[in-house]
Image: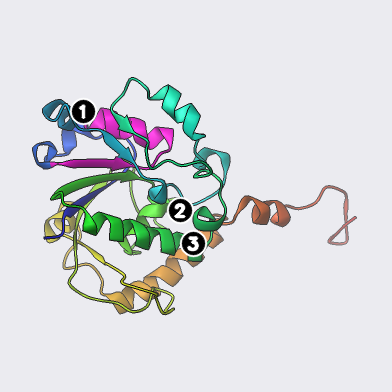
Amino acid sequence: MAPTVHCVRHAQLRDSFPFHDKIDLMTASPLRRTIYTALESFEPVFSMHPEMKLLALPDVQETSDVPCDTGSDPQVLREEFADKSVDLEMVHEDWNNKAGRYAPTNAALKERARAARRWLKARPEKEIVVVTHGGFLHYLTEDWEDSSTYQGTGWLNTEWRSYTFSDESHGDDLDGKALDGENFTLIETVESRERRGKEGPTPGREEQKTLYKKGTQGWDDQGLFQSQEERDAAKVPEGEEINGVRV
């Protein structure tokens, strides 16, 4: 049976999370802020399971390539967390190089989110926590409802939502592009939606395709989601403006 996945946007929430005693796998983006969130907010989980380590997953790192969304080199992380319950085995060299698999593009983000879902569904554990980032959570869950409510996300700091895997099978992504292989889909539980004031089930696949396009356009309108190279190219050049022309 596929696991229940509790998705968390990094921040403190120890007292508001009611399922500490059910968690049997803790994972997080390898960025320092998500690692510390997981260790501190889920300290009761680690206390109940002294042998458990937080597993750092490069595929759930943040979307952009700005410095605050770019992680540290593996050796730096190993030194910082040497005395803490953190498993950095999957944090390979160049995981923080925002190119290829980790590029800040829709295509790359959708693909690594799909890889993360496939990895999660294959796990033997029954209750998994994933501590990640506001922007990436929309790619991971494929839920784009209210995705531009805040700066680059529809998730509040400290917010957590619970998901199960759908039995549906989709041959294309939210752009309508054919997929090579299975696209496992996460569906937010009714209890989770009710807890945050949402009525009814999660929007269906076809509606999500529309919400996805609106969401990514909303991020572009906010000046987000571009790579650093694209942002630099969009900057107004230095100089004097004469009759609307920069000289």
Secondary structure at badge 1 equals: helix
Check the image and name the residue furthest to the left. Answer: 21
Q: Are marks 3 and 2 in contact (CB under 8 Å)?
A: no
**Does 67 appear in magenta?**
no
Type of amino acid under label 1: Glu
Check disc 1 and report the residue beneath it: 43
Q: Position of residue 6 (x, y in %)?
A: 21, 49
Q: Is residue 187 left or right of residue 207?
A: left
The picture quadrant where one finds residue 3 is bottom left
Check disc 3 and report the residue beneath it: 108
At label 1, counting other C-alpha atoms closer than 10 Å, the crowd grade (few under 14, some 14-19, many 20 or more) is some
Q: Which residues are magenta?
A: 23-43
Q: Which mark is residue 92?
A: none
Check disc 2 and report the residue beneath it: 152
The picture quadrant where one finds residue 85 is top left
Secondary structure at badge 2 equals: loop
Earlier residue among tags 3 and 2: 3
Type of amino acid under label 3: Ala
Q: CA distance from mark 3 to mark 2?
A: 17 Å
**Residue at (53% x, 44% y) in the render:** 94
Q: Is residue 91 left or right of residue 206?
A: right
Mark in the foreground, 2 or 1: 1
